[in-house]
Structures are given as structure tokens and as C-alpha cells.
Image (tube, helix red, strand yellow):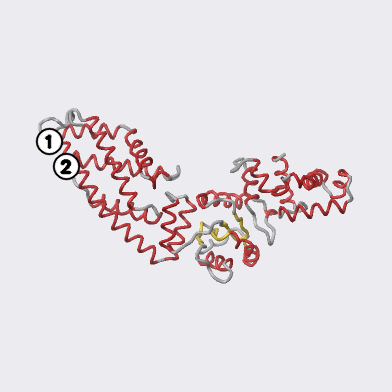
Amino acid sequence: MINAWSQPPSRSPASRGRVRDEILADPRVVEDVVAAVHTRVPAYAALDDSRLPEVRAIAAWGVDRMLHLWATDGTLAPADLRRFRGIAAARAADGRPVQAVLRAYRVAATVITDEVAARGGDLTAADGFALARMLLTALDTLSEEMATAYAATTEDLAGDRDRAKRLLLDDLIAGRHASAGALTDRSARLGVHLPDPYCLLVAEPTTEGGPDISYEEAAKLLAALGDGGTPVSALSTVRGSRAVLLLPAAAVHRAPAALDERAWRACAITGEGLDRVAVAHRLAADALDTAPAHAHRPGRLLTDADAHVLALLAGHPAATAEHIAHLVLGPLTEPDQRHLLQALTAYIDAGSATAAARALHLHPQSLRYRLRRIHALTSRDARDPWQRLTLDVARTIGA
């Protein structure tokens, strides 16, 4: 860098323009910025692939604007400040700390400086000083603008607590949280203690073509499942024609009655961690999209097992065959329950308890008792067409 900027201190706009054009024409530069931010800023290290395109787009815009300001001796325009404020507001809504966002810009500035130095053989000391002055001024200005916008958005969200809680669940569903720490901080600001273990319940009316579910209806269902009042740790929102609830796993046993009262059906996912709420929502939504009508019965919800079997049948399994088999069969996969698995296999293959008993050299009543035990252990009745199919798939792939 010293060699590049050791020329007489005079301004060379043509050289700055050349360097700017070279950098902007090289797609590697933006990727280097994203990689540096991803590596050096902890809050960005946890971003999944769904969030990186947004980071990349902001990085590309930032590199373009900073280099333009340097090449033209310009300053941040009102449109630039509005965009920075919008970015800060979005980060306040998704829980990414403003300190991490500002550090990301400082990291990006170092990458830009290195790129300019690597290409600046004909730049002067004045060009180097101009770059440093522009970056320092821009970082100072955007820090103030973004911190103010971040604080204002945070205050607004805290003031409208119901909306803020819906936005929290919306962001969990979309996978928009940068880290567990950011999620914890955001929850604490709202006074929300996320349930762990949790149930993600996705519910919809059984009749198609009606109006979309309102936020109020989703909140009423949440209150019903909260045993008389909405618990602090429970959240609800709406996605199109469906209500989405995040509630303690223990509350799921109250869901069938509340749903039957409303003539709704639902899928409840309880086997995913808080870092996989987006996965849980996708499983539940896909299950409701693809489950046949006879899979829905009064007093019964679709569960993780149903959702995973449906995903497998649709050709995009979300888990291994062994895991799906265990979800459906539960204790039947254990060695001391092998006799029950044999009874299930015989019943499915033979088509009746009498024929299955004959094949196993059992009295029909003994076979029926084993079927009742299977129902008790798996919550699946082999006489029900849909539940028999899930049991059949599980014992087949788990064999």
C-alpha cells in the first residue's frame, strides 16, 4: 500500500475511476466481503443459506456506493441514508444486534481498502487519504443513522407487543435469526420465554375456499390451548389461510378438542429444536398440503411421524429411513417388543386379525390384544386406513 500511494499528493480522478471500475467488474470482491463478514463477525457466522443472498446484495450495493463516493469526492446522499435506516430497522425486527451490523460494515471497509491498494499502482497519497477520509466519514454517518433507526424500531416493536410477538414467530418460521444469542436478546426484550421443548401447530379450516384465518382467530386458539389464558411463552401468527402456533409441547394434548370445536385440522411438530422452527413449519405445511382426507380424523392431529411419512412418499424425505421408522413405530423397534412388531407385520400382510393369528399360531384374541398394545405404544390404530399405511411404510423401511 505504501508503494502504491507514494506518488506526489495530487488528485487523480481518472486513476480512481479505473480502480473503481476494475473492482466492480470483479465478482470475487463481493464474495470476499461476504466471506470476511461471515468469518469475522460472530452474529453472521450462524446465517443459513436463505439469508446470505440478502447479505450479498447489501454488500454489492455498499461496495458500489463507497467506491463511487471515493472516485467522485462525493458524500452520502439522502437516498443512501434512507437505505441504511431501512437496513437497521430490518435488523431490529429480525433480532440481529446493531453492533454486529456496524462491525460488518467496518470489516467490509477493510476489504475495500485492500482491493484498492492491490490495484492502485498509479494512485497518489492524496487518493489514499481521500479513501480513508471517505470511509471514516461514511462509517461515522451510517453508524449514527443506523443506531438511531435501530433504537426507534426496537421501541416501536416493544410498544406494540402483540405485533412484535407475531413478527418474532414470523422470523422464526422464515429462519431469519442470525444466532441463538440474537434470538435470546430479542425474546428478552419482549418478555417472552420460548418454550423448549415446543410444539409448532399449523392449523386450517377443514372446508376449503373460505376466508383466511385472522390474527384474532389464531390468538383465540392459542388462548384455548393455554388453559384459560395465553401463556407468555406461546406465540401465534397467520400464514395465508393457516394459523401457526408455537406453544409448550405439553399443551398439544388440548389441541384436538379445540380444533374439533372449530372444525379445523392441523399438524403438530414436536421433535425439532428451536434452531429448526423453519424446518418444523415446512414439515407441517407440506403435510397439510399432501395428506389425504382420510388421514384427518376427529380428535386426532397429524404429527411428526405423519409429516415425515408424507415427505417420504412425496419423494423429498426430511430424515433418514431409520429415523422415520422410529418416529412411527416408537417402542416397537426395541428388541423386547419384537413380538408386537411381528404381530403388526402379520396383520398388515394378512389383512385381518384372524388370518394373522393363524399365521402366527396364536388365538385371535391374543392377536387383537397385541394390536391394542401397538395402539397404546404408538398412538396408531392398525385398523385405521391411514394409520395402517404409516405403520406399513415404517416397518418396511425399518426392516
Which of the two residues, 95 or 281, is positioned nearer the viewer here? 95
- Answer with left or right where residue 188 lies relative to residue 333: left
- Answer with left or right where residue 132 lies relative to residue 360: left
Q: Residue at x 85, y 46 (%)?
A: 356
**Res 56 → quadrant:** top left
**Res 106 → quadrant:** top left
* Mark identifier at residue 209: none
* Mark identifier at residue 73: 2
Q: Residue at x 51, y 61 (%)?
A: 236
Which quadrant: the N terminus? top left
Instruction: Indicate which disc, 1 or 2, sits on the residue closer to the N terminus.
Output: 1
Which of the two residues, 176 or 42, is positioned nearer the viewer here? 42
Q: Which residue is mark 1?
A: 11
Query: Horizontal and vertical percent for residue 291?
Result: 65, 51
What residue type is disc 1 on? Arg
What residue type is disc 2 on? Asp
- As drawn, 371 above or below 67: below
Neighbour class for label 1 at 10 Å: few (<14), some, many (≥20)? Answer: some
Q: Residue at x 64, y 46 (%)?
A: 310
- As drawn, 369 above or below 72: below
- Answer with left or right where residue 398 lies relative to residue 281: right
